[in-house]
């Protein structure tokens, strides 16, 4: 069974940086991997993703310029480097992986596997 394991969450202050890592327990061919987040009382939202098929990345407007996604397709790993963190970035961050993409990789339904989530809390 494929499992995605996230790590790197924690409590930081506004303006700090934090790196999140995600790794798959199985060696599979993923078309894309990404990060989503969900704050209490909010719906899960897209943060960033990398499509190795098209060698491209995409970011939510709210994090563009502050977050950077990178990874290793061969190793099925992905990293989300978060800089200039803001209190509004506080959420549980989920790693996701897609075997195939039929549409936009910012869409939750495109992903086949999800991690358990890691909490990121940014204080003022």
Image: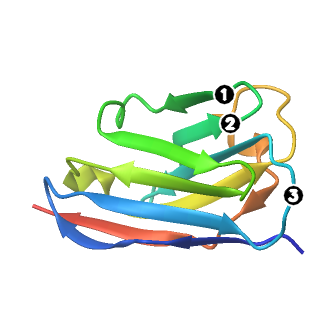
Report how far apart the C-alphas of labels 1 and 3 lie in the structure. 17 Å
Residue density around tag 2, few if under 14, some if 14–19, many if 20 or more, within 10 Å: few
Residue depth check, mark 2 versus mark 3: number of the one nearer the observer: 3
Which label number is shown at residue 55?
1
Among numbered discs 1 and 2, the one appearing first in the sequence: 1
Residue at which label 2 appears: 107
Residue 95: percent from the left, percent from the top? 61, 59
Rendered residue at 44%/60% (across/down): 41
What kind of element bears circle 1? Answer: loop
Rendered residue at 55%/50% (across/down): 35
Q: Relative to 92, say whether 1 is above or below.
A: below
Residue situated furthest left in the rendering: 124
Which label number is shown at residue 28?
3
What kind of element bears circle 3? Answer: loop
Residue 8 is left or right of residue 78, and the answer is: left
Which label number is shown at residue 65?
none
Q: Give 8 or 115, whichever is nearer the viewer.
A: 8
Rendered residue at 87%/58% (across/down): 28
């Amino acid at each position: 069974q494929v499992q995605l394991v996230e790590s790197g969450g924690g409590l930081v202050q506004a303006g700090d940086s934090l790196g999140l890592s995600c790794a798959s327990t199985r060696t599979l061919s993923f078309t894309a991997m990404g990060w989503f987040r969900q704050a209490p009382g909010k719906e899960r939202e897209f943060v960033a993703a990398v499509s190795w098929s098209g060698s491209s990345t995409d970011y939510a407007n709210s994090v563009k310029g502050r977050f950077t996604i990178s990874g290793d397709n061969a190793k099925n790993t992905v990293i989300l480097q978060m800089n200039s963190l803001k209190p509004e970035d506080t959420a549980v961050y989920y790693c996701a992986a897609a075997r195939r993409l039929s549409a936009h990789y910012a869409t939750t339904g495109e992903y086949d596997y999800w991690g358990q989530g890691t909490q990121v809390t940014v204080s003022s």
